[in-house]
Image (tube, rainbow, N blue to C red):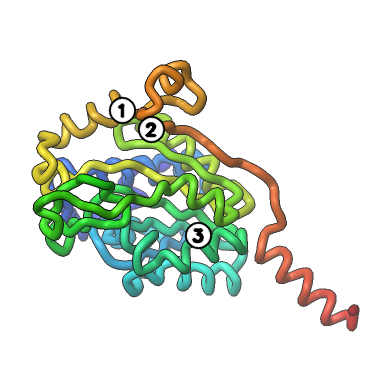
Amino acid sequence: MPKINDYIRERFFPHIWCPGCGHGIVLRGLITAVMEIGWDKNSIVMVSGIGCSSRISGYVDFHSLHTLHGRALAFATGVKITKPELNVIVPMGDGDALAIGGNHFIHAARRNIEMTAIVMNNRIYGMTGGQYSPLSGYGSKATTAPYGNIDHDFDVVTLSKAAGASFVARTTTYHVTQMVDILKKAFTHPGFSVVEVMSQCPTYYGRKNQMGDAADMMEWFKDNTTPIGSEAKQRNPALIERGIFIQEQKPEYCREYDGLIQKAMKGGA
């Protein structure tokens, strides 16, 4: 049976994430999901951009590309089109996914190309100084919003569904068992999968918004989220739902593209 150490690059540890950062929990959950699926690590390509979350590609012993800010999905699309047999995982933060990378995100979802986009949502730009992001939310504080943010945030799930993703889910770093289960289903789904993982940033978001330390922020995830369709949600609409929102079969881009090539080679109309 493989061990966690078989899937990481130990020479790059200790990692650079702040104490209490949720991204290490995501790393462990991701590797656990890969182990339980039984993938050969040489069949995996991880593509990331820039930011705290994007450093994850340096810690896994997979084929990996650490690319430009916001362009992870564009690079990943190139990898998948040319080598469709590979399993492509794209971990992203707030900016890579939905700010500078927003256009790539909606079109990757629209095409339904088979890969998994993990949106590690810590509601802040952590690596560059704690600026507010498209996921910070109205009223939240940041170094660039000392009196409160007036931008409204994206709902990752709603946006992904509207853009056409065929697998859409949300979980948190508190709900690790659920995270692993969702990632396993996302990784093996034959289409574009989006998994939002609510992840704590005690250094910037937690401190600026008086949410306490990492443990306090994870308790917040516990107390303020609920399974999809629960009675608790009916009683308290402010609760954030988690689970799998969409899991449907749609034509997958690489398979459709291969079909076009076969048709052209046969001279078909």
Image quadrant of residue 239?
Answer: top left
Q: What crowding class fits label 1: few (fewer than 14 Cα within 10 Å), some (14-19), or many (20 or more)?
A: some
Q: Nearer the viewer, mark 3 or mark 1?
A: 1
Which amino acid, by three-letter code, is at mark 3?
Val
**Residue occupied by mark 1:** 224
Image quadrant of residue 85?
Answer: bottom right
Q: Secondary structure at mark 1?
A: helix
Question: In the image, is 32 to the left or to the right of 193?
Answer: left
For marks 2 and 3, give the CA distance: 28 Å
Q: Position of residue 29 (x, y in %)?
A: 36, 40
Image quadrant of residue 220?
Answer: top left
Residue name at image x 54 percent, y 63 percent? 108
Question: In the image, is 239 to the left or to the right of 40?
Answer: left
Q: Earlier in the sequence, mark 3 or mark 1?
A: 3
Residue 109 higher or lower than 76, as above or below: above
Q: Nearer the viewer, residue 186 or 171?
A: 171
Which amino acid, by three-letter code, is at mark 1?
Asn
Q: Position of residue 251 (x, y in %)?
A: 71, 57
**Residue occupied by mark 2:** 240
Do tag 2 and tag 1 residues touch (Cβ < 8 Å)? yes
**Residue occupied by mark 3:** 88
Q: Nearer the viewer, residue 149 or 133?
A: 149
Question: In the image, is 121 to the left or to the right of 193?
Answer: left
Q: Earlier in the sequence, mark 2 or mark 3?
A: 3
Residue name at image x 32 percent, y 47 percent? 27
For marks 2 and 1, give the CA distance: 6 Å
Q: What crowding class fits label 3: few (fewer than 14 Cα within 10 Å), some (14-19), or many (20 or more)?
A: many
Residue name at image x 69 percent, y 47 percent? 249
Which amino acid, by three-letter code, is at mark 2?
Ile
Q: Nearer the viewer, residue 184 or 269?
A: 269
For marks 3 and 1, give the CA distance: 32 Å
